[in-house]
Amino acid sequence: MTKREERLSILTQTDGPLWAQGVRFAGMDEAGRGPLAGSVVAACVVMPPSPLLPWVDDSKKLSPQRREKVYDEILATALFVGVGEASAREIDQYNILEATKMAMRRAAEGAPASLFLIDALSGLGLPGEERGIIHGDALSYSIAAASIVAKVTRDRQMAALDTQYPLYGFAQHKGYGTAQHIAALRQYGPCPAHRVTFIGHFV
C-alpha cells in the first residue's frame, strides 16, 4: 500500500461506514479563525463514495499548487459544495467563535444531508445532527475535502485583498500575524479588511 493509499484508508474509516449505511452526510471545516485580517470562511461538502480522489487530505498537508488542483477535482466530483463566510466586521461584532458558527450555518444552507461531520466544533445550529470530530480534517475524507475548499477560497480572497490593499502583503501571509504584517500595520495602520478586535495590541 502506498502512502497515499494509506492516507485514504485512514480518512475513509470515518466516512466508509456512513456510506455503507446510506447516511446522507456532509463534511465541514473552516479557514481563517486566527488571522488579523479577512473573513473566516467555512465549507460544507457532500462527497460520493466513488471515485475517491487520491490527494484529498488535510489542507495544511498539501502545497498551494496541489490544493488548487484538488479543489478543482472536488468541485467536479462533489454532490454538493457550500461556502459561507463571516466578514471582518462580523468577527469584530460577534467574536470569532460566533462568526465561525455563522459562516458554517451559511455554508450548510441547502445541503442534502441529515448528518454534519465538523472539524472540532459542535452546537452550530445546523439543519441536522452535528458530530464534532477533533482533528477531523485528518480523520474524515469529507471534512478534509471541506478543509481544502475553505482554504483555497480564503486564500483567493486574500490575494484579491492584496491587490486592493497592497501595503500589507496579504497574498504572502494571508492575513496572519507575521513580522512583515505587523510591521506594515504599525507603519500604515489598519485597513478596512483588518479585524479591529484582533489588532489592538499590535498598533
Image: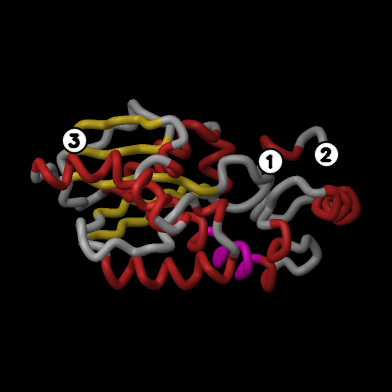
The chief SS type of the magenta part is helix
Q: CA distance from mark 1 to mark 2?
A: 10 Å
* C-beta proximity under 8 Å, tags 3 and 2: no
Q: CA distance from mark 1 to mark 3?
A: 34 Å
Query: Is 155 contained in the magenta span?
Result: yes
Residue 163 left/right relative to 86: right
Question: Of residues 24 and 150, which is closer to you in this image?
Answer: 24
Q: Position of residue 54 (x, y in %)?
A: 38, 63
The circle drawn on residue 196 is 1
The residue located at (44%, 30%) in the rendering is: 134
Q: Position of residue 4 (x, y in %)?
A: 44, 58
Report the span colored magenta: 154-161
Which residue in the protein does label 2 denote?
202
Q: Earlier in the sequence, mark 3 or mark 2?
A: 3
Q: Is residue 7 above or below residue 159?
A: above
The residue located at (76%, 51%) in the rendering is: 190
The circle drawn on residue 128 is 3
Comparing labels 1 and 3, the label whose residue is closer to the camera: 3
Q: CA distance from mark 3 to mark 2?
A: 41 Å
Of the residues shown, which amino acid type is indicated by label 1? Val
Q: Is residue 157 above or below residue 106?
A: below
Of the residues shown, which amino acid type is indicated by label 2? Phe
Quarter occupied by residue 81: bottom left
Of the residues shown, which amino acid type is indicated by label 3? Gly
Q: Position of residue 29 (x, y in %)?
A: 42, 45
Residue 115 left/right relative to 133: left
